[in-house]
Image (cartoon, coloured by chain):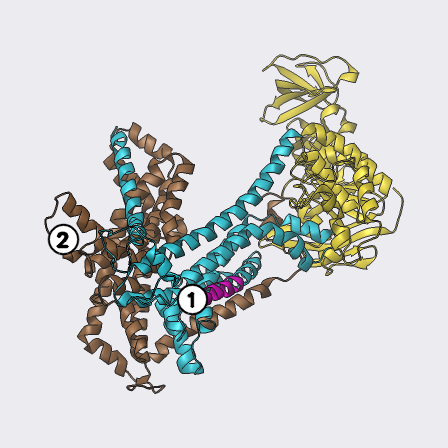
Amino acid sequence: MESRVLKPILAVYTALFILFLYGPFFVLAILSFQKGPEGGPQFPILEWSTYWYRHIFGLVPPSRIAPLPLGEAMFRSLTLAFMTMVTSTVLGVMSAQAFRRKFKGSGFVFYLIVLGMMVPGVLTGLGVSLLANNVLGIERHWWSTAFVTHVVYTFPFAFLVMLAILNRFDPSVEEASWSLGVSPARTFRKVTFPLIFPGVLSAMLFAFTLSYDEFSRTLFASGRDQTLPLAIYGTFSVEIHPNVFAFGVLTTVFSFALLAVYALLMSLSVRRARKMAVQEDIA
Amino acid sequence: MTDHQPIFRLEGVTKSYGQVKALRDVTLRVAGNEYISLLGPSGSGKSTLLRVIAGFEAPDSGQVFFEGRDITHVPAHERGIGFVFQNFALFPHLTVFDNVAFGLRNGKAPEPADLDKRVRDIIALVGLSGMEGRGVHQISGGQKQRVALARTLVMAPRLVLLDEPLGALDANLRHRMRNELRAIREKLGVTFLHVTGSETEALAMGDRVVVLDHGRIAQFGKPDEVYGRPASPNVAHFLNRYNIFSGALEGSTFTGPFGAIGVSGGTPSDKPAYAIRYDRMTVEPAGAPVAGPAIPATFVASEYLGSSVIYFFEAADGQVIEVEHHLSLGAPQSYEPKAQYLLRWRPEDAIVFGPGVN
Amino acid sequence: MSDTALPAASVSSGNSKSAWLIVPGMIWMLLFLVAPILLILYVSFWTQTTFKIEPTLTLQSWKAFFGSDTYLASLWTTIRIWLLVLAATFIVGYPTALFVGLFVKNKTLSTVLLVICVIPFWTSFLIRVLAWRPMLGKEGAINIILQKFGITSQPIEALLFTELSVVIGMTQIYVVFMVGPIAFMLGRIDPNIIEAARDLGAGFGRIFWKIIFPLSLPGVIVGAIFVSVMVLGEFATAAALSGRKVNLLGNIIVTQVGSLKWAMASVAGVILTIVMGLVIAGFLRIVDLKREL
């Protein structure tokens, strides 16, 4: 039938689609190995080299191409991502915990939180800048104004992850703990938290990477000192060199490394559960 | 049972979920050192009642007393009442030992010096010695229920609430656990309040049985009382051992599908009904001369239960009538499907319900 | 209603009052999301002088916006780019969603395919934008390939630093938000329905238009809302891939803030919010999501 024809066509299309998604990045990765400092950000590759990677770390003799201003920006981005991760995960766990019991206006609060991930960064960034600059009269910094807008953006993700986890959570284990004379606070520490920890890990991962890569909110709200994405953006307007490509490869590798660590932690807990299940079969 | 000071007492407890009234004005007193079964069909409010006593739910009105103290507003963790869940609710991240030791370690009281011995003793009591180090995923359903029980009992509560504790077990295990639960309770002298939807379980296990019907206590008595003299047509229905005929009661005459029968006395009830236990009916050939009440019915099928046989008949109005024949009284009979028979009973075996009788 | 379902429905937190836990998160959102957005509306009526802004209410900036060809043009560009990208993500994404959601019967494989689509989202947004430069440039990968296969003799210069490059870049970045929801809805279609229609002799085209597409429509709407919100709030892709030729409302806001023209930035912000609100409301009118999902 037609679907017998259609399926391979769609399969080929999907392969092309994936090429469309990944193609630019592969081209960028290839060009990051361009010869330096003469080679430009285009084909052909004059000669394969790791010059631009060494350029990033300042390991090549000075040339007319200035090194990317990355060191401090990197430190700021990591610190900011860490602060954001902790804050939004705590807020996310607390809010999702509150949502386990229906309360008045819970629908409104739900939309209020989710709004944070829907409103474009231009608007939150502009709004918070107005608040700081024209109402409070304070300077904008990456650790103050940019930080609060990052949390506005990542907290909804953490909240939704925790909500999904707590929805599947069996409340009777908590009740069992109470009935054994253990206070709700200690029950949360000793029972609830260990059981929802995989979810907390996911929420942390989301918050960290989203904040680490966040750009549009930061552009408005971070003031003078740049974060990593801002430093990259700064290179857009001027002539670009393959060093930006090399950095793109490195930062992507870093994002994937985070993902790998997360996957490792998750699979460890899954394997522990499976090991128990296997022993159950033996027993 | 002995007339102890009541260990717990409910006074006019009412609880609704939105429009649904789960408990209506429940008043109940239970003496110490007793096995109480709480029987009710699903939706009767029996789990809610248990959760109100445990403190997981607050009643809309009424009071809960435990050991003479009003605990209506005391949070669950300060009540000292044990709770065993149908799904066991074990802590999945802890071993058997740590599950049992959990309350002793994390409760308000400081960790006892003899924790190790107490935990091992109670694990031995429920027959799980040697499994202390296992994860709770590594043990069977019956073993899980024992851990749940040990975890509760190690706290030495004076009252343990069991919410359909055997519901998740298979039939064989359920039977064995019945005896064990009774034995453990007697050994420790605690009061068990055991919620179940199974009438056989309720009757077999309880020193006394509470029957809950639409959020109200319909009957509270010893198993033989409840079984022999159900307090309402609904209780008779839950017991699953009564053929219940509806009809009209006028003076001392009950008019049902079997015609008009003279009755003497009966049990007060809103709606008139006439109930005969399955094993109090006898099957006669159609047209046999019988003195006393009888109803013609068509034989449908039979079910062999081991010690007895149940015969299913259908009356003219379509009602299914069950007749139980105990094999100790003779060999099973075989009846002709779709053939007419006459089912008779002695009038004094019938229970008559109706307004204004006594 | 079952006996055990009753307590479960009224989520049991025992006697502990947990509602206060929502307070910190709510305060955060009210202070740093709702208040700033209301502030944008307020500041759009402030009086702007060259380097100063005062809270004296005036329509000056609003009049300036609607009296300026540049600003109005940016509004039309925003709407044009939004429509183009929306159409492109739908056209490019739907067949993939169809394959992943409906044709791949193996659940693991369809999950893997979806994950493959989502992974790029994990990398830096700016790097993904940047990656289009060596693709689309005059000496870029696409031109090299086109010439190598003899499809074109001259490099196509229109690929980079045009509206086209912005649309291509945004499509690649946002198409996954279209694919995901559609594939999800397609995955929920009961195969028996399609089988039954086939037994009745319906061809694939008929089945698609009568059954598959209507059932996937809520996914299309959700995807469209995602894509719309993100594209309307864009500025970085336009800045990086158009060589400043394409100015969206977002770009106006960035440049106005850069030159401390807060009132004008706020006007653009309010207009952007209104456009977005209208677009979302419009989509929600097409399909009642609460009922469909």
Task: Say if C241 sits above or below B320 in the image.
Answer: below
Q: Which mark is residue C155?
A: 2
- Camera sees residue B264: no
Mark 1 belongs to chain: A
Kindly identify which residue carries mark 1.
A71
Residue at point 78%, 53% (across, down): B80
- Residue C275 located within the stretch drawn in magenta: no
Residue depth check, mark 2 versus mark 1: number of the one nearer the observer: 1
Q: Colour of chain C?
A: brown
Decide which of A270, C130 is in the foreground and name it.
C130
The image shows residue C288 at horizontal and vertical percentages of 36, 53
Task: Say if A45 sits above or below B210 in the image.
Answer: below
The image shows residue A215 at horizontal and vertical percentages of 37, 65
Decide which of B112, C119 is in the foreground and name it.
C119
Mark 2 belongs to chain: C
Q: Quadrant of residue C124?
A: bottom left
The image shows residue B14 at horizontal and vertical percentages of 68, 55
Q: How dense is the environment of label 2, judged by Cα within 10 Å: few (below 14), some, or many (20 and up)?
A: some
Residue at point 39%, 75% (across, down): A224
Task: Say if A208 sits above or below B254 in the image.
Answer: below
Name which residue type carries label 1: Gly
Task: Say if B102 sits above or below C280 in the image.
Answer: above
Q: List the single residue furthest toward the left.
A: C153
Q: Colour of chain B?
A: yellow
- Tell me, by letter, which chain the rendering colours cyan: A
Decide which of A50, B248 is in the foreground and name it.
A50
SS assignment at label 2: loop
Name which residue type carries label 2: Pro
- Camera sees residue A241: yes
Q: Quadrant of residue B195?
A: top right
Range of magenta residues: A71-87
